[in-house]
Image (cartoon, rainbow, N blue to C red):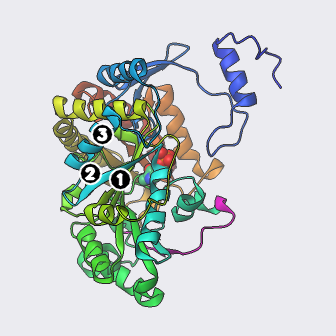
Amino acid sequence: MSDLSNSNPTHDPEWIQQMHADHYLQSWSKQGGKPRVIAGAKGSWFWDSDGNRFLDFQSQLVNANLGHQHPKIVQAIKDQADKLCYISPAMGSDVRSELAAIMNEITPSNITSTFFTTGGSAANETAIRLARHYTGRQKIVARYRSYHGATGGTLSLTGDPRHHLTRADMPGIVRMLDPYHYRCPMGHAEVENCPVCQGGPHLEELLMYENPSTVAAVIVESVVGTNGIIVPPDGYMQSLRETCDKYGILLIADEVMSGFGRTGKWFAVDHWDVQPDIITSAKGINSGYVPLGTMSVSTDLHDWLRNTPLPGGLTYAGHPLACASGVAAIRAMQEEGTLAHATEMGSLLREELHKLAQKHPCIGDVRGLGMFNGIELVKDRDTKEPLVPYGAKGVVAKPMNEMMSYAMENGLYLSFFSNIIRLTPPLNISHDDLMIGLAILDRTLDIADQAISG
Ligand SMILES: Cc1ncc(COP(=O)(O)O)c(C=O)c1O
């Protein structure tokens, strides 16, 4: 217990840190640490109580797609708060209907209706339950390099090390390998020769063993986010779609990170003209200002739901404050040409990263789509031995941790996963800010170069 009083909140930085350490439980962490206290944020920057400024090169949890405190989103929340803060999900509300109509407009043409949730986990949880009800089948195919959420079902779907925390996985998950062509899981040099990197052939083989008539859905992140920004080869998503169609299996595209302009299109599947049966999203829909997620479904599913109750619900489904912020964020993106800007800045970012790769031997791979980018660090480019092993933490992850600290001390907020640095700035970042971030990244990478040379 702290000796600072919590009955007399002073809100000074020391009090905030102490109460955080003593009484706040932090996601995925050992407790008791004292956090950096954030005093404010604007655009691509945030700052702490000591006045240190940080360029947000990860858009917080890859959700602040329009940066911090976007005035149009903030105003919409204020206006909605004045008008109607909450009304039951079964009631009609202007912003709820407007956001549902906008989702119909911007999702692929087969997707026509949306269930609003409080975030990505609830969207995916509802999606897999719906898929099971609709098909009458139980199994769900999911990949290893994936994160789908923190609820019972979605943490079981998740393939990254966090799924070991479920203690008892939800039954019926079948694991598929990832189209990770930089390190092809089958050891092929060319995508064309690889059943995994092509998608459909690998799925076919799994289905042969599993019996396709027991499989309800395949769920994939259209572009893998947390687990290292893996963009599937062209043809991969189409190939999954075809195989799913052949066996009456639903295709669920988890676009919680990759949606809402992150890849330069509304949804990453738009790059390949693929029509999933269900798209889930959250995060960038409203830049995370109010909790909001979506599960959008095809006309076929919607028609089926006209006669069968939706197997899911939430007190905060279609929350007016969240819907108002979603409407404002999407309209702002349309008015401000955000998708085109993200495409342009994303190309520039990758060009600059390729230049950094010429200078820094630690860079093994540069990859990404739009503003969804990553660099993979290696000890040796020829062997591709990772700078730190998969899932490394603590002393094993030393060079990565040192880079993270150095970047932060020098004003750059970056995100790391194993040996991968993710670069996901706000979609509306300015050219100048992008170059500032790259200059700090350049110096940060010296740490990895030193680690491999000595
Ligand atoms: C691809 C993906 N799916 C689902 C989730 C879970 O979303 P939430 O944390 O909003 O529940 C995340 C969160 O990072 C994610 O990246």
Label 1 to label 3: alpha-carbon separation: 22 Å
Residue highlighted by disc 3? 97
- Within 10 Å of disc 1 (Cα), the crowding (few <14, some 14-19, many 20+) is many
Name the secondary structure under disc 2.
loop
Residue 170 percent coordinates (x, y): 60, 68
Q: Image point 64% across, 11% down: which residue?
A: 12
Amino acid found under the numbered disc labelled 1: Glu
The amino acid beneath tag 2 is Phe
Name the residue carrying label 2. Answer: 267
Q: Which residues are magenta?
A: 165-178
Per the model, the C-alpha gap separating discs 3 and 2 is 21 Å
Give x and y (percent) for residue 179: 35, 69
Left or right of 83, for residue 274: left
Residue at 58% over, 21% down: 37
- Which is more toward the observer, 36 or 112? 112
Asked if the residues shown at circle 1 and circle 2 are in contact, with their CB atoms under 8 angstroms apart, the answer is yes
The earlier-in-sequence mark between 3 and 2 is 3
- Mark 1 to mark 2: distance in Å? 7 Å
Residue on which the image places disc 1: 255
> Is residue 175 shown in magenta?
yes
Q: Find residue 246 and report its image quarter.
A: bottom left
Q: Earlier in the sequence, mark 1 or mark 3?
A: 3
Q: Can residue 214 be seen in the rendering of this structure?
A: yes
